[in-house]
Amino acid sequence: MPEIDWDLLTGAAREAMSRAYAPYSNFPVGAAALTEDGIIVSGCNVENASYGLTLCAECSLVSALHMGGGGRLVAFACVDGKGNVLMPCGRCRQLLYEHRAPGMVLLTVSGVRTMDEVLPDAFGPQNL
Ligand code: THU
């Protein structure tokens, strides 16, 4: 399991946030995650004139994960336009859950939490 460098991860999330396309909400978001292989993947939110079609930063991150060959996520961080830690929305917790490594941790507003803590009793592949 790779060592988690939270400064590096939040730095990657801030860098991703700078690429956000958020002309409607003016709320840019950047997300970054570390894979089991020690690779950092990142993403930014991409909005749309049809507001409901907005892609969260985590959607972009998960796409980047797969385009880069896939893998399991061991650590995740997300920031707002000021670079402050942001909680992933409920839908995105589910997205991240699908691709988690066992024991995955997230940097949250209340410190480092496990995936199971931010999405308890989750629905997932194990239910199908
Ligand atoms: N947003 C994300 O990208 N991820 C989240 O987890 C929370 C919300 C984006 C969606 C929208 O572009 C903006 O933040 C305001 O809701």
Image (tube, grey):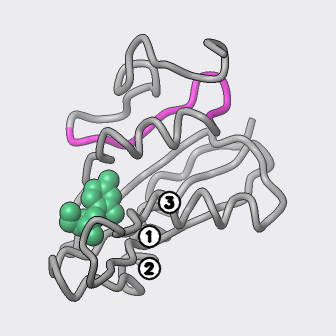
Crowd tier of the residue under label 3, counting other residues whose Cα lies within 10 Å: few below 14, some 14–19, many 20 or above: many
* Residue that mark 3 sits on: 59
Percent position (x, y) of residue 111? Answer: 28, 35
Please say if 57 is above or below 126.
Answer: below
Asked if disc 3 is less than 8 Å from ligand 1, the answer is yes
Mark on residue 104?
Answer: none
- Horizontal side of 109 relative to 29 (left or right) equals left
- Of labels 2 and 3, earlier in sequence is 2
Answer with the quadrant where ligand 1 appears in the image.
bottom left
Callout 2: SS: helix
Please say if 34 is above or below 99.
Answer: below
Q: What's the residue type where badge 3 is placed? A: Cys
Crowd tier of the residue under label 1, counting other residues whose Cα lies within 10 Å: few below 14, some 14–19, many 20 or above: some
Taking depth in this image into account, of 114 and 8 the one nearest to the observer is 114
Question: Dividing the picture into quarters, in which one does residue 25 lie?
Answer: bottom left
The residues colored magenta run: 100-109
Question: Dividing the picture into quarters, in which one does residue 104 lie?
Answer: top right
Name the residue at the right extreme. Answer: 69
- Of labels 1 and 3, earlier in sequence is 1
Q: CA distance from mark 2 to mark 3?
A: 16 Å
Percent position (x, y) of residue 76? Answer: 49, 47
Q: What's the residue type where badge 2 is placed? A: Glu
Q: CA distance from mark 1 to mark 3?
A: 19 Å
Q: What's the residue type where badge 1 is placed? A: Gly
Percent position (x, y) of residue 7? Answer: 44, 60
Mark on residue 15?
Answer: 2
